[in-house]
Structure formats: structure tokens, C-alpha cells
Amino acid sequence: MVYDRRVAVILFAVLIAASLLDSLSITSLAISDSDFTTYIIVPMLMLPLFALFMLKERIEPHVGRRDVAVGIVIFAVLALLTVFLRAQLSYLFSDLHVEMLLFPLLLLSLAALLFGIRNLNRFKAIAIYSLFASPALLLWMASLNSAFVVANTLAIYGALSLFFHNAAYIAPLTITANGYSVGIGETCVGIGILIGTVLFLAPLAYLYDGKLSSKALWVASGFGLMLLLNLLRMLGIAFAWFFYGPSNAILTVHLFAGILLFYIAIVVMILLSGRYGLRMPLPVRRKEKRARPGAAARSNGTRFYLAGIAAAVAVTAVYLLLLSDYPGVQVVSPLVVYDRVGFNASGLDGLVNTISNESSFNVSIFQDTQDEYILMTFSNATFNQSAPIEVLLLSSRIDELRALTNNTTVTGELTFFSTSGLTQRVYSLSSDGYGFLLYNEVEPYAFANGSSTSVAIYAVLPENRTSSGITCQGYYNAPYTEMINAPDPRSYNSTADAEMTSAYCIIERMVG
């Protein structure tokens, strides 16, 4: 087989597709009207196609020893950043798909290994595009969504008032007519579909030959068409609602019409691409002399192309291992995380019930009258009333860790990375000859109205009552836990590690 640009591009696309498997496992495969951040499925699915579209660039691979070394170094940086950021960001890493913010490094690593570093500049477009597979990039639009919904409601009301003289607008999102009322909520506007349309058309615009201004106009027209079709959808639903009254049939049409209009918009824009001066790139036919397998590779300086391919496959395999726990991670919608409200202990009934549901303990619960914290004590034959386990729930904005560790000596510290994607820490502390173990984690708590708060959980256990033989490997990701703790010399004390692991297992059974 002659190693040329076609082979390199196909390998590049296949490895990108494989690299996305873990991310896809925690991503909705449909764009939801109620959660616009689900648009990220579009760039994820389009990335391998974008890679195939790079055949138009006619990039000639040139892989040498230095290119392989640089590709491996780039990936090493990516691996270190992944481990570090997962430990620091905890649940936010998976909720915001931070791995996709780091994905350009993987693309550059694969590009260096398969094409050589002299060609890295040709991969800027796909690297930038991959960033949009993280909702963090456009999450700021959540603050504009309400105003956008009101604008759509006013547009629908303006159109309806031409046909229904008794139509009335009730701010901010309700229209009444013929004795019925309809609310144009955020689930109707479909801003995720609008963003998805742009992100679907962008790689196609890259593929087409034509002026950059023409491509930009074509993508913008696709956005405008999708916006118009979405307004017509809402207008049609409102007409049916006011003429025939509410019905399940109308709601069903409303549910499925959005994705159908998405496909219609894409097909229409592809058919109209010629009107914008865009055309598919034509293959270039060149007469080439027959060469022995590998001769072309050797002639253009890619003597190390086999090493590059092997390294690229290995890089992809290691990347998949780094995110192999993703299918079990508990993901919260970025919109819930974004819509943070003030901490109020009264609203934590679900979390309190989960933690206090311990048949082997006698549980006492004290709630602060100012709703600033909840204190729970757990006692049994081992942890008696004079030395119970104490669990404290309060706002993550309060640095209680400093207060609890004040005037103490930290004799050990272990960081655990739970199978649900949370970073949790256990400290071994000593104060005036008394030893105790401190557990700490921060997790999101989602309310029924779609908002959330961030809860810090602290647990204190007396050291001399905690057995050092308790294990719970299924509660945490062992490889990540080992990697996170490796740089800390305090994590190599086997006796302290066993005690802290036991404390972690006891508390994790309560709060997990």
C-alpha cells in the first residue's frame, strides 16, 4: 500500500470517530427543544466527516522522527491536562464536556503523527470547529434565551392578530384568542436547532469551493431559513390550537416538527448552494508512474510513516482509556449547572433523606434556623454518642475546610475520583493528640424547577474508631485515583492510606 494523503486522511477520520465514542456515550443523540445545549451532538457527529472533507486540501504527508516525537509530546500534554482538570473541575468536566475543549490537542497530535508537523497549519479549521462540541463555548446564550423567546412570542402575536381580532398578548409569553391561551415557552423556540443548523452547514461550507464571503452568506442563510421555518411551526401550532382547541395530536406534531424542519432546511440549503457560487471540489487527475509499495512514502520523506501510524493508533487507544469511565458518569445538563440559585438548606430534602437512610445508624438531624446548614450525627455500637460520625451540609461558597483544619496538623491526604465523576478528598488530621478523619466533596443539587445549587458535604470521623480494613473499589475510579495522588508524597503512607480509604468508603456509602 502506498502511503499518501488519501490513506492518511481516511486514517485520521477513523481515529477521530473512535476517539469520540466515550463522549458520545454521555451525549443525547437528539437536539432537544427544552435543552438547547444538546446541539453539541451535531459537531460531534460531523467531526469525522469534516476530517474526510480534508481530502480537498491535497495535503502530502511528510512524517519523520521529529514529527512522531512532537505528536507524542502533544498527546502527553493532553493526557496530563485531562487528568489534572478532571481532578480540579470534578463533575463540571463531564457536564461541560471539557474533554472537547481539549480535543484540538488530540487533533494536532494525530495530524503530526499522520501528516507531519509541517502540515499542522492546515488543521486550524477542524481544530476550532471541534471546540463547539463543548456546550461551555455557547453557554452564555442561556442568559439571552428569555429575551429571544419574548421576541418570538411578539412575532407570533403580530401574525395571529391579522387573523384573530380577539387575539391578546399577555406579557411575557402568552397569547389568547377564541377562548384559548397558548404559551410560547423556551421549548417552542428551538434555539438548539438553530445552532445545530449552523454547525451542520459549516463543514459543508468548508468542503465547497467558492469565496469565503459566499460561504458565510450561505451558512447565514441557512440560519435564517431555519429561524423562519421555526416561526412558521409555532404559528401553525397556534392556529390549530385556536381553531380546534388543545389536543394530543397538536402536541405530538409540535414535538416532532422541529427535527423534521431541521432536515428540510439542510436539504434546501444544499440544493441552493449553486446559487451562492458554491460547488463541490472536482478531483484532480494526474498521471503517475507505478511505484513499488512504500516507494512514494520514501520519496517524499515519510520514512517513519509506519511509526506514525502505530503511534496514532496507540494515542487513540490511550485517549479512550482516559475517558473509559464516561458511560457510568452521572451527567447534569449544563443549563441546570448554569442556573445556580442561592443555597437554602430547606430545599435539600432529597439529599438529606438519601444520606440519613442508614439502618445501621441512629441518625439525628439539626437544621439551622437561618437555613444556612444542616448537621447530621450518626451513631451505633462503633461510633457511639461520645464519638459519632458528623455530616455537615452547607453552601460550597463557605470555606468550611479552612475552619475544620485550623489549628490541626495534616498527616495525610487522599483524593478519590468517584465512578459518578466527582472529586472527593479525605484528610487525616491531628489536634492536641486527638486524631480524626475529614471527608469533603462538592456536588450539584438539582431542583424540580430546573435550577440548582452547589452543596459542600463534610464528614468527620474519629480516627481510633475507624477500621483500616474497609474497601470499596467499585465506588471510585482506581486508575484516576492513583494518578491524581501520585505527585503527593503524603499518599505513600500505607497505614494512613488504609485508614483514609476506610473513612471514604464509610461516608461514600451514605452520600453516594
Image: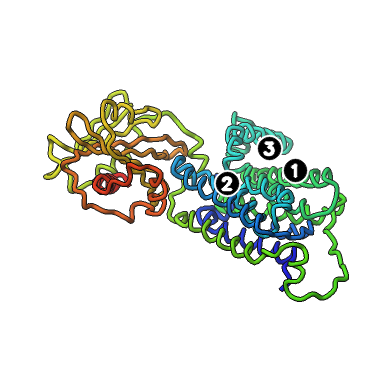
Residue 512 position within the rendered picture, expressed as x and y whole percent measured from the top left: 33, 47
Q: CA distance from mark 2 to mark 1?
A: 31 Å
* Element type where label 1 sits in the image: helix
Residue 347 position within the rendered picture, expressed as x and y whole percent measured from the top left: 35, 34
Other-residue count near label 2 (Cα within 10 Å), few / some / many at <14 / 14–19 / ≥20? some
Q: Nearer the viewer, mark 3 or mark 2?
A: 2
* Element type where label 3 sits in the image: helix
Q: Is residue 25 visible?
A: yes
Say which mark, if any, is on residue 224. Answer: 1
Q: Which residue does the image show at 25% across and 38% down from the upper left? A: 437
Q: Tell me which numbered mark, 2 or 1, is placed earlier along the sequence.
A: 2
* Element type where label 2 sits in the image: loop
Other-residue count near label 3 (Cα within 10 Å), few / some / many at <14 / 14–19 / ≥20? many
Say which mark, if any, is on residue 102. Answer: 2
Asked if 462 appears above or below 15 in the picture, the reply is: above
Q: Which residue does the image show at 42% across and 28% down from the upper left? A: 342
Asked if 40 appears above or below 148 in the picture, the reply is: below
Q: Quadrant of residue 390?
A: top left
Of 192 and 237, the residue lying toward us: 192
Left or right side of 504 for 260: right
Of 132 and 111, the residue lying toward us: 111
Q: Tell me which numbered mark, 3 or 1, is placed earlier along the sequence.
A: 3
Q: Which residue does the image show at 44% across and 36% down from the upper left? A: 452
Residue 13 position within the rendered picture, expressed as x and y whole percent measured from the top left: 66, 61
Type of amino acid under label 2: Leu
Left or right side of 422 for 12: right
Type of amino acid under label 3: Ile
Residue 476 position within the rendered picture, expressed as x and y whole percent measured from the top left: 36, 51
Type of amino acid under label 1: Gly
